[in-house]
Amino acid sequence: MSGRVLARVVATVLGLVLWVPGAAEASGSKLRTQYTGVVNLNEATVAQLDLLPGVGPKAAQRIIAWRQKRAFKRVEELVRVKGFGKKQFLKLKPYLTLEGPSSLKVEKVPVEEDEVRATGDATAKR
């Protein structure tokens, strides 16, 4: 590779590295994940359980294996399933139910300007 070609490649790469982050910030393209609805622990499919924050396909399979042996009588019983401690349960609790259909939806929504300021203020005080 000649010196000129190498110089162009380096300049292009540096230009992209410097340009891309600024463009993302300027456009305000920050997104957050929003969860709405609930998942019925006794009826949900692997795909529906996988929508829960922090729950993947393997954890979803463990939930299903648990309920095949013994149906959930309370959502708090989720902590008896391997991989689900109290902290994880508290994160999931608003999205769990034992009645009705599963209706959980996950969407990426733009972060509001007020949320960015509130987050910035909170982190500045810590």
Image (cartoon, helix red, strand yellow):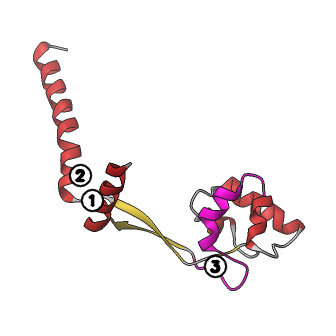
**Which residues lie in the magenta part?**
81-103
Where residue 66 sits in the image (x, y, percent)?
Answer: 83, 63
Q: Amino acid at mark 2?
A: Ala
Look at label 1 and name its amino acid: Ser
Q: Is residue 58 above or below residue 107?
A: above
Residue at figure coordinates x 64%, y 69% from the top left: 93
Determine the residue positioned at 39% across, 62% down. 32
Give the labeled residue for mark 1: 29
The vertical placement of 30 against 101, above or below, is: above
Measuring from the top left, give residue 71's x and y in whole percent.
84, 73
**Mark 1 and mark 3: Cα distance apart in space:** 30 Å
Task: Return the residue at label 2.
Answer: 24
Q: Quadrant of residue 72?
A: bottom right
* SS at badge 1: loop
Q: Earlier in the sequence, mark 2 or mark 1?
A: 2
Q: How many marks?
A: 3
> Can the viewer see residue 47 in this picture?
no
Kindly identify which residue carries mark 3.
102
